[in-house]
Each structure stands twice: as C-alpha cells, then as structure tokens.
Amino acid sequence: MDNQEIEKKMMSIVAEDGSVEEVEVILAFEFKDTKKEYVIYTKNEKDENDNVTVYVSHVDRSSGEPKLLGIDDEEEWNRVKDVLRELSKVE
Amino acid sequence: MALDNTEFIDRDLVVQEQNNVGSNRIRLRELSFSGVSEAFREFRKKQLEEQVSVARDELAGNVAFADADGKISESEKEKVFEKAAAIAKLEEQIKILDRETIPQNFVKSRAIKLLDTWLDNCRYNGHSAYSVGLEKADELFASAANEEGFVPEEVAPEKVTSEEVVSGVTAPEEVTPEEVVFEVPAPEESMDLGLSDSDVEEQIDDMLNKSGGEVVEPVADLEFDDTEEVADVPVESEEALPEEEFITDADVQNVVESEFGELEEEPMISKNPEAAARVDRYVEDGPLPFVMPDISQEDLLSGIKPDSSVVAPDFSDYEFDDVAEADKERMPVIVPPRVFDGVETTMGVNADEARQADESEEVVSVNEKVDVSTLSGLKQRLLDMREKSRESNERMLDAKRLAQETDERAAQVRAEVQEMQVQYKSRVEKIKEKIAKLEELQKAEEKETELAYLTVEANQRFIDDHQEKMAVMTDEMAEINSLLSLIDEDENDDTIGVKSV
C-alpha cells in the first residue's frame, strides 16, 4: 500500500463485468443502537463552485459479501445527515 | 448529539456489486468536506497510535532467550527486530496521515534503532533470558526518541550493532546535532519596496481588521535586538558563529528534524525562532460551513455511475426547507474567505528578510503563485489581497445577514410548531378522555345486561319448579273434588233411608 493509499482510505467496487472502480472513503461509521454500517465515499467530483459530491451508502453484510445499498428511510437519512453536519463543523 | 451514538469504523472494504450500487448523493462545501475528512483522519491516526502503544508494550515486555553461551541468540534478535519493524511501520503510517515528510528507508532505520536500543537496555533476568521490562518501556522509547536519527545510505557506518541480524545492511551512524555544519549564504541586498515597513504593516493590519482576522504584530516588533547579529552575517564556518546564540541549538535541531534528507541544499536559518508559529497564527478557516442539501429522492442513484438525467444542482436550494422562494432567488453564493492550508515556513537570513518573508507568507494564498522576490510582485500581491479582502468582507456581511434572516424565520417556524404540538396534545387528551368514558359506559351496560340475564334465568327456574307443583296440585284438587262429590251423594242417600223405616 503506497503512501497515497494510506493517507486516503480507498475502497474498491467490483462491477458485475469484473471492472474495478477505486473510490476514496471519506467516512465509515455505524450507529451504536441500530448497528447499521454506513460508508461515505467520493469520486472527487466537483461542480463549478468547488462543492464536492459525496455518496452515502448503507453497507449490508448479511449475505457475506458486503453490498452498498441506498437509504430509503427518511429518518435514517436525516440521522446520517446530522452526523455529517456535526463533523463538518469540527475544527 | 448525533456523534454520541456514532462509532467510526476503519475497515478495509472491497464491495462486490451484485446488481446496482445504491447510494444517496449529497453535495458538500469544500470546508464541510475538509471537516469530515479531517475528523476521520484523526480517528484513523488515533487508532494507529493505540496500536503503536500496544506494540511498544509488547516490545518492552519481550523476553529473549539466551543460548548455550548465555548470549541472546540470533533467532531471538530476529523476533525483536520483527516487533520493532512492526512499530516502525505503524509510526510511518501515522506520519503519512500527518502529511509529514518521510525519509527514505524510514521503517528499516527506525526498526534498527529500536533494536539497538532494546539490546542496549535489556538485562539478564536470571531465567536464561534477557528482557527490558514494561516498567522501562518509557525509558526505552525515550532513548530511541530521535526518530530521524539515521544517516543516508551513502555515509559509511562506523558503529555496527545489529549487522548480524539485518544481513547486508549496516547500522546507520548516529548523528548528533553538533556534527552538522551549515553554510549560511550571504544576505541579499535589501530591496527598496517604495513602501516603508510601517506602510506595509498598516495596510496588512487594515486588511486583517476588515476581514475579521486576528491582527498580530509584525515580526519587526519583537523585542529582541538583532542588529548586531545582522552585522555578523555571512558566516562561512562554524567557528565564525558568534557566541551569543546567533544559531541556537533549538534552531539546529529544528532544521535537522524538519529538513533531514535534504542536506544537499543550503538551509537558511531563521533569525526569529518564533517565525513558524507566527505564520501559523495567520491561518484562517472561515465561517462555519453550510452543508448542501441532498438531491431529492427522485434523483436517488441506483448505479455506480451517476445518472446523467439527474438535474444539475440548483444552487439556490439550501439546507433549510422553509426558505421562501423569493429569498432563494436572491440568496448569495457563500464562498468562504481565503483558506490557508499548511503554509511552508520560509526562513530569512536576517531580520529584515525574515520579516518580509513572514509578511509575504501571510498574504499568499495556497493556490496563488506570485513571485514575491520582486518589488512589483509584492505590490501586486498587496493590491490583489486588498481587493480580495474587500470582496470577502462583502460576502461575509451578506452571509451574516442571510443567517440572521434565516434564524428569524427558523424561530418563527419553531414557535408555530410548538403551538401546533400543544394543540395536538390537548386534542389527543380530549379524545382519550372520551374513549375512557365510552369504555366505562360500555362496561356498565355489560354489567346490567348480565344481571338481567341472571334474573331471567332465576325466574325461569322458579316458573319451571312451580309449574310442576301446580300440576301435582291440580291432580290432587281433582281427586279431592271427586271425593267431595261422593260424600255429598252418601249424605243424600242416608236421608232417604230414614223415611222408609
């Protein structure tokens, strides 16, 4: 693992056709009460105002291999956003 | 707080995609993104530091068995070296996360250093083994504290302590600061900027005051007197250095620690040992960042690649849902003021150049590349920064006004919500009361119904019992009547017999 990979935590997403996409993990956490695991990653996409697009997924390990699922529940999504808000204010 | 119920995770993750990768998407401002990344980086660093602590205890508590001659065997030394290498590897990862410059062969050199220190500090414990002991762990790593104490490979080593362990690699020579000789270049001619120092300082102070930054007195206002030391420059050899601390041990140590590996260059020694700290004091991070709202649920991604039909981000769509439509249109773009990342400290040879270097670093943005070595460049930068400062000040005022307006609206909404909640609660209470009353009424009716059924049952039993009795009595009455009629007939017959005698 080179220095760049250590400084930035990378995640590999393997597609059905076998192609691999490397994305940068910004944050990985789980809620203590629900034990649900989430990962927030980026493909370093920026818009014209330098805002960064990040992707938020729930990590499902129930079938052995980890899968990334979207968050459909509104309350759950709000909880995740609250975490992001608090972390973004940490100096 | 949301973070109280949250636990960070640092696991390696390889995701096998089955169908599509489901992800919600959200936009973060640059500062928000940095904040989140930084928090996770700190967490990862803390994890590594904990692992280092455990590994250090293991190394300090390690027991190396002696061979037949009473010495530490080679295999035992290899085990110690492996533990030391593991610690060095973790320390390297911590340095990478701290974005420090890592010298070449750091892991190997550090491992050798730790091994040597362990061997120097281990003692025979009377059980055919050598150990340092946990109680000496702090001492062990304190003596190995000079983590950069290694010499580049081209320097011939004089001391070999672990050559038999690391085959083909000789231990590095230990370098002490006193052995390092620096050549201090001649000072450049002082530049006439056309602006006096006080003018420049005044302008910079004005900019900082307007932008709300911290105003720090310029370097020139430091109390130490360096005029004599300026006169002593240039210094060509170590012997020519004046005794009155022109170059302090701390300066040399700092240079050794921070610039090791670049000894080919001619390092410049700062006249002001506080220069680095003073530059850092000009670092600003801007106001609290906003978090852009997520894309609506309709735009929820269902694949690895973003859907090209997703609507382009609407910059007027902010976090607070209650922003009025009119406000959305005139809502300004909030761009944080200039952000300084880690500014490399440049050190001047003399006091004037150090001061100019500090002031020039203050006004340099990370992304700007302006030649500060010329008068015109410095002037241009000053003018640019004044313009930027004015713009950022205007943006800041707009942002503050917007924040105040949204605060007021949020307070209003909050009050309305509270009122609705109160009404909701009172109505719920009323409904509950009515339900309770209906339940009581229903129970009472059930009781009455039950009593009525019991009464009917009792009456029916009474009727059944007496009907039987009435039947019996009726039969008896009939028999009695028949007997009475017989008696009457007999009485009539007796009366007739008397007359015939």
Image (cartoon, rainbow, N blue to C red):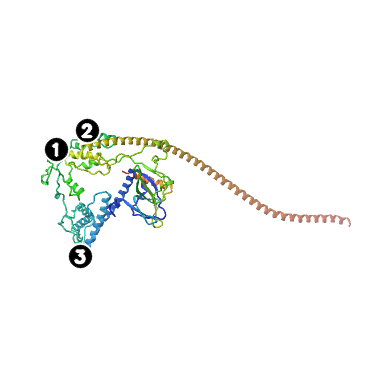
Mark 3 belongs to chain: B
Tag 2 residue:
B199
Q: Position of residue B92 (x, y in %)?
A: 25, 53
Q: Position of residue B77 (x, y in %)?
A: 21, 61
**Residue B323 versus residue B295: which sits nearer the camera?**
B295
Mark 2 belongs to chain: B
Dot 3 falls on a residue whose secondary structure is loop
Q: CA distance from mark 1 to mark 3?
A: 65 Å
Q: Reading the chain from its start, which is encountered first: label 2 or label 3?
A: 3
Q: Residues within 10 Å of mark 1 (few under 14, many from 20)?
A: few
- Give the residue type that dot 1 points to: Thr
Q: Which mark is residue B67?
A: 3
- Identify the residue shown where x is 53% and y is 44%: B435
From this view, report whether residue B170 is shown above or below residue A31.
below
Q: Where is residue B248, by image quadrant?
A: top left
1 and 3 marks in contact (CB < 8 Å): no
Q: Is residue A36 visible?
A: no
Q: Position of residue B500 (x, y in %)?
A: 89, 57
Tag 1 residue:
B227
Q: Residues within 10 Å of mark 2 (few under 14, many from 20)?
A: few
- Name the quarter where the N terminus of chain A is drawn: bottom left
Q: Is residue B337 visible?
A: yes
Residue positioned most to the left: B239
**Residue B167 versus residue B299: which sits nearer the camera?**
B299
Between disc 1 and disc 2, the foreground one is 2
Q: Where is residue B316, by image quadrant?
A: top left
Q: Position of residue B164 (x, y in %)?
A: 19, 61
Between disc 1 and disc 3, the foreground one is 1
